[in-house]
Image (cartoon, rainbow, N blue to C red):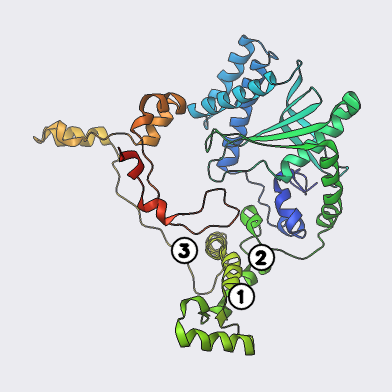
Amino acid sequence: MSATGHALLSSSSSHRWLNCTPAPRFEAQFESGETSVYAKEGTLAHSICEEVANYNFHKIDKRTFNNRMKKLRQDELYKEEMEKTAEFYGNYLFQKYLSFEQKPFTVQEDMVDLRDWVPEGFGTCDSIIIGSGKIHITDYKHGKGVQVSAVNNPQMRLYALGALKKYMPIYGDTIKTVSMAIVQPRISEDVEEEELTVEELLAWGDNIKPIAEKAYKGEGEFNPGSWCKFCKAKGVCKARTENATALEDFKDAVILGKLEGEEKTKAATEKLLTGSDKILTDEEVADLLERGKYLVEWYNDLQEYALQAILDGHIIPGFKVVAGKSNRAWSDEDAAFKAIVASGIEETMLYERKAKTLSQLEKMIGKKDFEAMVGQFITKPMDKPTLTGSDDSRPDYSEAKKDFEGVVENAV
C-alpha cells in the first residue's frame, strides 16, 4: 500500500497501469494527499446510492433509511440531484434483481480481495447480486465528464474476479457467468453491460497477473496514451512529452493526397525512392492523427503544472502567475435593484423572461415523461461532419443523407 493508505495498484487506475507499468511508482511521488471536491461529491453520492439500494432490498427499514438520509442531506456538498440519480441506480438494481429466476443474494459496498491477481490489491464493489448461476456486479459513476464503458473495462473485471473469489467457496461451480454494468445517470440512462463466462474471466485474470507484478515493481517502459488523463505525473512525464514533441519533425511535411497531377506524381516518386518523411501517405496521416490527438491535452497539463509549481514557490523561467480577468458583480443585488427602482426605473425593466432550454426542461420533467409530452415536436438535424476514431459507434457521415434530410418527412 502507498503512504496514503490506498492500494498502489488501485482498480480504478488499472487502465493506466496495465498500459504503462512504471506509472504507479512514478506518480506515487506526486501524491498530495488532498481529495478533490469532485471526489468528495462522488463519495457522498455513493453513500446515498447505498442507502437507497439497501432500502429497496429491505436491508433497512423506512425509519432507518430516513434517519440516514437526513444526515446525508446535511452535508455541505449535498445536492437534490444526488437523490434522483440514486433513485435511478436503485431502480436499475431492483430490475436486475427481478430478472433472476430465483431470489438472489444481494450486498452493497462489499470489499473484495484481489491479491491473487494484483499485489496488495483490493477493491469495493458498489453492488453484487448472486443467483441463478450468475454474479452481477454494478458500479455507480457520479461523474458527468467522460462516459465510461463496461465493455473490456479492467476495473470492473477486477471487481468481478474479487467477487468470484469471495463467493465461489459458498456457491461452488454453480456460478457459470459473471456480468458487469456501469450506471452513470448524469450522462446516460442507457446502462451498458458485459457478460463473461467464469472461464473467460479467470483467463483474463491470468493474463494480467504478470503485468500487475511488473507494475508493482515499477518495471517496464513508459507508454503515453489516453490513460494519462488522471495520472498525477502527467505534467512532467518525459515519455509523454517526447510523444507530443515528436510531431515537430513533421511540421513541414506535405500531404500526398492534397497534391494533384504532375506535382503528385513527382512527390510519390520521391517518396518511393527516398522514403522521405516530409511526404505523408494516407496511412502516415492516420498514424500522426493517432499520435497527435493528445497534443493539446498534454500542453494544457503542462500549463496546469507550471501554474501550480509557481504558486508553490518554484521558478519556471520566462513565466509568472498573475490575477486573471474577473467580471463585476453585485455585493448586494437586492439593495442595488431597490436603488435603481427608487431612481424612477420601472422594476419590470430589470428582468427578462427567458425560456428554459430543451435539456433543462427534460431534466426537470424526466426523460420518459418529456418524450411522451413533446417528443413529436423535437427534431435533431444532422450536424457538420466530424473526424473521429473508427471505433466510434456512430454511423458514418453521409453527404447524401444530409442533402435529403427532411425530404421523406415532407413527401406525400
Q: Residue at 47% across / 87% down in the picture?
A: 263
Residue at image mark 2: 237
Residue at image mark 3: 321
| 405 sits to left or right of 244 | left
Mark 3 vs 2, N-terminal side: 2
Local packing at callout 3 (Cα closer than 10 Å; few below 14, some 14-19, many 20+) is few
Mark 1 vs 2, N-terminal side: 2
| 164 sits to left or right of 373 | right
Disc 3 marks which amino acid? Val
Q: CA distance from mark 3 to mark 2?
A: 22 Å
Q: CA distance from mark 1 to mark 2?
A: 14 Å
Expressed as whole percent of the image width and height from the top left, the position of residue 12 reads 70, 44
Q: Nearer the viewer, mark 3 or mark 2?
A: 2
Question: Which quarter of the figure has residue 294?
Answer: bottom right
Residue at image mark 1: 246
Q: Residue at 39% across / 34% down in the picture?
A: 360
Expressed as whole percent of the image width and height from the top left, the position of residue 363 reads 43, 30
Disc 1 marks which amino acid? Ala
Q: CA distance from mark 3 to mark 1?
A: 29 Å
Residue furthest to the front in view is 412
Q: For numbered disc 3, what is the local secondary structure?
A: loop
